[in-house]
Image: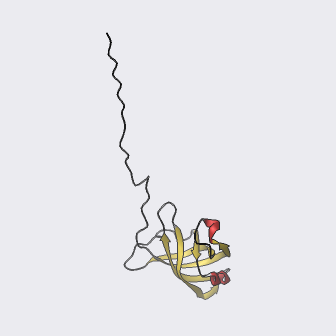
Amino acid sequence: MSITIVAALSTPAVTTALQAPAPAAPNESAIVADVLDAAVIPASSVGIRPEQPLCVLTLRLRSVAPVPGVLDALAGRAGQTVRAYSKDVALAALAGRRVTGTLSLDGDERSGRLWVRTLSASREGSR
């Protein structure tokens, strides 16, 4: 007589930081940037609801500085080009200008987006 033992091994569901991104901690970065491009797009084109117009700005970061009291989401990114979004479609008029303002990362570290908190044309004018 033979006995067959069947054992099923299973691993418990474990969530790691790599599997489940955490929401971005409160953050904000002060920037000086050149607006390389600006366009008004429908929010649904980037998976955002409710449907509304958004301004998407392509910015070349000239300088990045921390804002006191919060994390600096753009630390070390001066010289890079980033995309930032805003519900203020009038910001599209800043295309080709140098700007100053603040940006923050909303969402999580994998699928977060940079959002304009404040932005205005710099005294330096055009790039």
Where in the figure is residue 32, as x and y percent of width and height? 55, 80
Between 85 and 49, the residue placed more toward the observer is 49
Residue 88 seen anywhere in this rendered image of the structure: yes
Question: Is residue 127 shown to the viewer in this render?
Answer: no
Could you tell me which residue is drawn at 45 percent across and 76 percent down?
28
Residue 104 image position (x, y, % from top left): 49, 74
Residue at left 39%, top 75%?
70
Display colour scheme? secondary structure
Left or right, 76 with respect to 7, comes to right
Tell me residue 27's x, y (percent): 43, 73
Q: Position of residue 91 (x, y in %)?
A: 63, 82
Q: Residue furthest front?
A: 1
Of residues 32 and 6, which is closer to you in this image? 6
Please tell me which residue is depicted at 32% across the width and 16% down the height of the picture. 3
Q: Is residue 124 above or below residue 52?
A: below
Q: Is residue 106 above or below residue 93?
A: above
